[in-house]
Image (spheres, coloured by chain):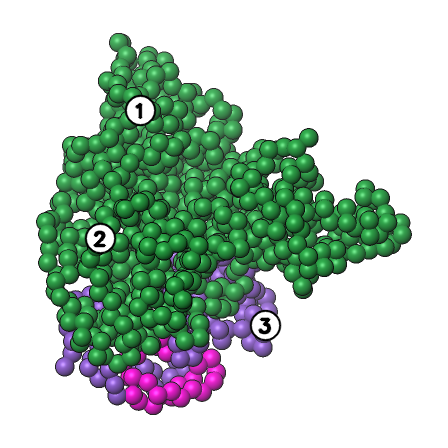
Amino acid sequence: MSKELPAALAQNPDLDRWLCFDEHETLTLRTGKVELGQGIKTALAMICAEELDLDLSRIRVQSGDTEVCPNEFMTAGSMSVEGSGSAIRQVSAEARHYLMRLAADLLNAPFDELVIENGHVRHPSTNRSTTYWELMAGRRFDLQASGEISPKSADTHQLVGTRVQRIDLYAKFTGQPVFIQDQNFPRMVHGRILRPPGYLHTLQSLAADTIRAMPGVLSVLVDGSFAGVVAETEMQVIAARNKMQALANWSRNGLLPKPEDIHDFLTSHVSVSLPVVDGMPVEEPVPAIIQTEAAAVRLAATYTKPFHMHGAIGPSAAVAEWREGKLKLWSHSQGPMVVRGAIAQVLKMRPEDIHVMHVENAGCYGHNGADDAALDACMLAQSVPDRPVLLKWSREDEHAWEPYGPAMVLKLQADLDGNGNITAWNHDTYSNTHMGRPIPFGSVSNFIAAWHKAEPMPKPEARPGMALHGGMHRNSDPYYTLPRKRIIKHLVQEAPIRTSSTRGLGAYGNVFAIESFMDELAHTAGLDPVEFRLQHLQDQRAIDVVKTSMDAALKARRRNRADAKANDKRAAYGHGMAFARYKNSKCYVAVCVDLMVNTETSEIKLIHAVIAADAGQVIDPDGLSNQLEGGFIQSASWTLKEQVNFDENGITSRDWETYPILTFPEIPTVDVILLDHPEEPSLGSGEATQGPTSAAIANAVFDATGLRLRDIPFTPDKLVSAALKSR
Amino acid sequence: MAIKLIFPEHQFAMTDAHAGGLKELKFVVNGKSRAIRIDPGTPLLYILRNELGLCSPRYGCGSEQCGACKVIVDGKMGFACTLTAEELDGCDIRTLEGLAVDGSLHVLQQAFLAENAAQCGYCASGIIMTAALLLEENQAPSRSEIQQALVGNLCRCGAHNRIIQAIQRAAQELSIE
Ligand code: FES
Ligand code: FES
């Protein structure tokens, strides 16, 4: 009986889309998902190697090429192992079955007696053998996936679930050209763009002729407020761009709000407000706050987060070549197929005439400048036909123009009865959009360059995401069992600052609020915060991660505290825990944080963290730990240090000094504990630690100082003002 | 006359001389003598990447804030993004490409592979070079000494602890040898 095919496979059912046996006894595995540093190539190659009984070293992964790879839209939302992975498992199982049948015929041996070792098929009793490559002999499969073949059962896996060496790191540790900035083509030239000083500026004049006369300059492109330059060499293009910057005149229309007013702006501005039921927005009127008659405890609190940057270490870049009315584009976009359509729309081309190939850039997880740089490069390439243009953004371009993770306000209110049970729960999330990616939109666009052209395509009106745990409402519905809850999303459509998707979307802010509030409720009712959570959890897997993390954290604390100078009077130690299940349906994570607050400087120093996670079946345990820990550190950095600063003129966080992130000396030790469930499906986990980390830190600060921090980032001045208020 | 810049891509002064005036400069890169004619204001980063085809030093900020471009110059840590050609005349420069000897990887490279010590790996070149210098000066660095040595290297992916473990592993390997 045929099973339903995984969605990605149903959309791309040809085996040849996914698999190609190459000449040199290797296999090319194609996927629409792209490498962002998350190790997806390794995880997908492991799945393929497992099903086909191949060594990992025989697999080459080709990803994100719009002409040859399966269309899998976007690499986002921690969906790749679940989505592409299950398609690859099925397609590989079907390929193996087909090859076994060919081998059985060729070797004149019963199918069931064949053994496969690293692509070599053998019939032991006759000792006849062949290989996948002989069987395919350069042919195509010309087969469609049927769903009739079952992949191996998890308990027979040899490779999946074991620790392997990442397949892409050798090149990176030996200095090979792997990143987009390293691309080098014959006759390649260099491009730069000159963005306005701020969002509200328009270009008045540029002295383009002066720039054109500079050495090596091939083209100066000015289209409205879009300005760019192409020159033969990189030094020439930098010199030209710098001169452009010095000579350009801009005018400013209007002012940005004051940064200290941004949270009031969000809560007082017109918004599209929708109730969220079971993680899904519904088009119904917003109900009144729910309360119980005789609450033993009633508590309300407001939490806030600022705009956060993706802040990849390598600024965005792209290579584009314009030849005979067609474009070739090398880009680090998270959605090569999507960006192709969106660029086609701006340039009034057919999508088929743009060939996008994914090339890696530095990691950051989310919608950074990659797509904008891709369009910039295409526009510059059109001004110098037949010459590939390598366009690079500067650090300042990236810091000032990437779309930030939106500022958010989270208002919570709950009632408890006399037994410490939550009897009413209210959660209001206020934010600008978390979904500003440039998907093809008609006459509007989400590209900077499209806004700046002389004939601009304006920004689309932000629409409330209606998907399950889709945007700002991701994880706004707590995973706890609560009798009555009222959860509302308030999308503020007017956005003075450019925003889009950062890792975890709304989950970071929502879980920060929920898990801080759970602690506040427990303390107000005089209950233990962990017991209080367990009292409201029913899913055993959730309970297990919470308990596992607490046990491990306690052991580590005993160890660490023995080392710590316990009698240091300037140090206040504290620990905190937070839990969430990502999207209420993906990876379970509990994070425990042990930290120290310096009572003189009010600085928070993380000492140790424990992450306990249940991601169902684990494909690549080391890759999973890497993701969970990396997410923890990024989230800790957001929580302790990061905030995009601006004044009425524009963004003032324009480098790493004005937008500091966590540095090596500030990194705590981290233990990651994986609760493997080979019998369960793999659960997306790449964004699962973002939320719990922030609240675990807030709860630990409270434990250390008795001060509750509700406004991210937790800089020393926040602690000082919390202390003053508590007096 | 210096052109005044509002937000220069690089924090070095661009002079008019920059547009012309080539100069012959000699230095040693990864053990090989090199002579090139170049504008003396050119940052080392572009010489290595564009003139010499060595792309391990990477641009991250152009202003000594991220460490992606770090290389070893005359036995000291150098930021390739701000060191200019004329400051380098006669210098000895080492990049990640020169770390492996006769095709066998440096103990740090092996340790980084064994620990899967990266996510995207964009930060790796500058970090491995910083660690190489650290291990030359201190064969048994503590965790906090490693953290201090890397204070100028940013990593956005959060691979820090793996990187620290890889450096500790390399130090151990060296002590056994
Ligand atoms: S590029 Fe040199 S330190 Fe950032
Ligand atoms: S591994 Fe991506 S920046 Fe360090």
Rendered-image quadrant of the N terminus of chain A: top right
Quote the CA–CA distance across marks 3 and 1.
64 Å
**The disc labelled 2 sits on which kind of residue?**
Pro
Quote the CA–CA distance across marks 3 and 2.
55 Å
Q: Is residue A410 magenta?
A: no
- According to the colouring, which chain is green? A
- Which range of residues does the magenta coloring cover? B22-48
Residue B4: which quarter of the image? bottom left
Question: Circle 3 is placed at which residue position?
Answer: B104
Q: At which x and y percent is residue A587?
A: 48, 36
Q: At which x and y percent is residue A678?
A: 61, 36
Q: Is residue A490 above or below residue B69?
A: above
Tell which circle, 2 or 1, labels the residue nearer the N-terminal end. Answer: 1
Element type at mark 1: loop
Q: Residues within 10 Å of mark 2 (few under 14, many from 20)?
A: some
Single out the mark in the foreground, 3 or 1: 1
Colour seen for chain B: purple
Element type at mark 3: loop
Q: Does the rendering let one see residue A598?
A: no
Question: Circle 1 is placed at which residue position?
Answer: A283
Front-lying residue, A206 or A34: A206
Single out the mark in the foreground, 3 or 2: 2
Residue plotted at (38% across, 41% down): A504
Rendered-image quadrant of the C terminus of chain A: top left
Question: Circle 2 is placed at which residue position?
Answer: A456
Chain ID at mark 3:
B
